[in-house]
Image (tube, coloured by chain):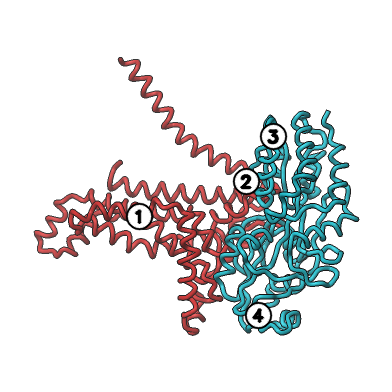
Amino acid sequence: MRSTDLRFRIGIGIFAAALLLIVVAIGITLANDSSLSLQRFGFRFWRTSNWDPVAGEFGALPFIWGTFYSSVLALAIATPVALGIAVFISELCPQALRAPLMFLTELLAAIPSIVYGLWGIFVLVPAVRAIEALMPEGLRALPLFSGPPFGVGMLAAALILAVMVVPFTSAVAREVLKTVPMTQREAAFALGATRFEAIRAAMFYARTGIIGAVMLGFGRALGETMAVTMVIGNNPQVSLSLFAPQYTMAAVIANEFTEAANALYLSALIEIGLVLFVITLLVNVLSRGLIWSMAPP
Amino acid sequence: MTINGAGATFPYPIYSKWFSEYNKLHPDVRINYQSIGSGGGIQQVTNRTVFFGATDGPMNEDQLKGAPGIMHFPTVLGAVVPVYNVAGVSELKFTGQALADIYLGKIKKWNDPALTKLNPGVKLPATDISVVHRSDGSGTTYIFVDYLSKISPQFKSDVGVSTSVKWPAGVGGKGNEGVSGLVTQTPGSIGYVELIYALQNKIPFGSVQNAAGEFVKASTDAVTKAAAAAAATIPEDFRVSITNAQGAGAYPISSFTWILLYQDPMDKRAGNAMVDFLKWALTDGQKYAPDLGYAPLPANVIMLEQAALDRIKVS
């Protein structure tokens, strides 16, 4: 009996270790295959903006900027909505509505990203273009709204990312709120708190986990590829403007990898993959850590 | 016998048609083709992980050094057309210089004198031109910038020729569908797509002035004419750009697409089968091309290629 037990433990241990090994192997492969670009450009790769495959000059700053900017904007839009959904479902929702609502938010997560992209091109982008065209001249002078109204650009990308992030953040936030002991709320009510104040107390209690939920959404937004590349305009420039076409790390890899025929070009694209890999890994580890400190797995 | 190949996405529809038709004639020969892109095709044939490659742009000197003995065989022809969205305008003429200046961001308005002079009688609005290009690396981009670089020295030095380039202006759409989607939706925009794509989706496109000074609207016929005109000076290895070809009626933004084979293949049986297949594709196979929107090869190029195929060492 004992020996089967041991074999079973070793067996599943190997599977568990394989997972870790795969992550490490991906990291090593990316670092290895990008060595040409790492050596050639060094830190210049991170802080220059010239991406010129013909001249063999590669600087990834616009992609890094575009990835962070679009993700931060998406979070700014998605977080209030996602937390609102989570609070409603866990604290206020009538029992009969709870299951359908949870199902609907989770359905959003199940839609393939190419479908989001198509919806983006045909519905969201024309709507964004109309809004941009209505923007009064005075506001257009601000750097945040400068540039011609293409429709495709940072705003469209941030909006589509926000829709995609909501189900993740709200599902995790809901789970975190569930872990808040009932006594917390009861104590608040006992002190004469209103419904709102009691919920606020519960959210304060769950703050680490909620931050983790938001960051998990951030990690999701950073790596999103297909939908973003279809609406962001794919123009590598560092711009504050919400209307400007920009670019993300995942999008440039998806766009240019298949036709990258020379070694340095390929290596530069793989280095972008490495950067994205490291950043998403850090963000996910951090957010998971925060969530687990609240709701141990 | 199974033969594996990989490369360009542009000829994928005709290649898959050919492979399935050829398989009907020769049930023992099965050819698999992965349309992973020209860059990937060159790389895989260089590493010999596939038996043949396919590309929309000929291999450059560096790439040739990596794959000694590789040969280029043109299979069919394609073309790139300028598409636009200007309210009330259904016919537009372009010169290469005007297209280059639009894509350099030097011509910014539709009523720029350079455009109004070419299109007398067409009422062009005083609106901004929204430039749309491909965001993904693509043979379509290669053909387009190859043409613009031949016409405009400034385009050549500022942008250059590759499947992906650093665009001075505009937004990028992914794939032909991304570009045409942006163009059809954005008033005042201009883009470029493959001729097949424009024909199949009935997207109106402009005519372009060729080297002889005529304004030619792209058609499979006009593309074959460009190739026929270039055939007289075609190099022995077939690595030739036929954009801006001389000759009457030739459409200037045309190009071959190539299959890549080693002159001394390691697997002789596969080599033999592939040579037989190509001989069929160059003759009987050409009749499938126009229906799929590709231009068939001119007779003089086919003759040269048959001679080159005989140089492959299959025994």
Badge nearest the viewer, 3 or 4: 3
Question: Mark 1 to mark 4: distance in Å?
Answer: 44 Å
Mark 1 is on which residue type?
Pro
Q: Mark 4 — on which chain does it sit?
A: B
In depth, the one of A267 and A259 nearer the eye is A259
Check whether the beta carbons of the residues at disc 1 and disc 4 lie within 8 A of each other.
no
In depth, the one of A225 and A31 nearer the eye is A225
Residue A211 location, x and y as percent? 34, 55
Mark 2 is on which residue type?
Ser
Dot label at residue B3:
3
Q: Mark 3 — on which chain does it sit?
A: B
| Residue closest to the far right | B232
Question: Mark 2 to mark 3: distance in Å?
Answer: 32 Å
Badge nearest the viewer, 1 or 3: 3
Residue designated by label 1: A167
Residue designated by label 2: A34
Does residue A219 sit above or below A126 in this rendering? above
Residue designated by label 4: B109
Residue A222 location, x and y as percent? 47, 55
Badge nearest the viewer, 1 or 4: 4
**Tags 1 and 2 both on a single chain:** yes
Q: With A271 as the anchor, is B311 left or right in this view?
A: right
Circle 3 sits in a helix, a strand or a loop, which is it?
strand
Question: Mark 1 to mark 3: distance in Å?
Answer: 46 Å
Mark 4 is on which residue type?
Lys
Dot label at residue B120:
none
Mark 3 is on which residue type?
Ile
Badge nearest the viewer, 2 or 3: 3
Q: Quadrant of the N terminus of chain B?
A: top right
Badge nearest the viewer, 1 or 2: 1
Figure chain in cyan:
B
Residue appearing at x 72%, y 42% in the figure: B53
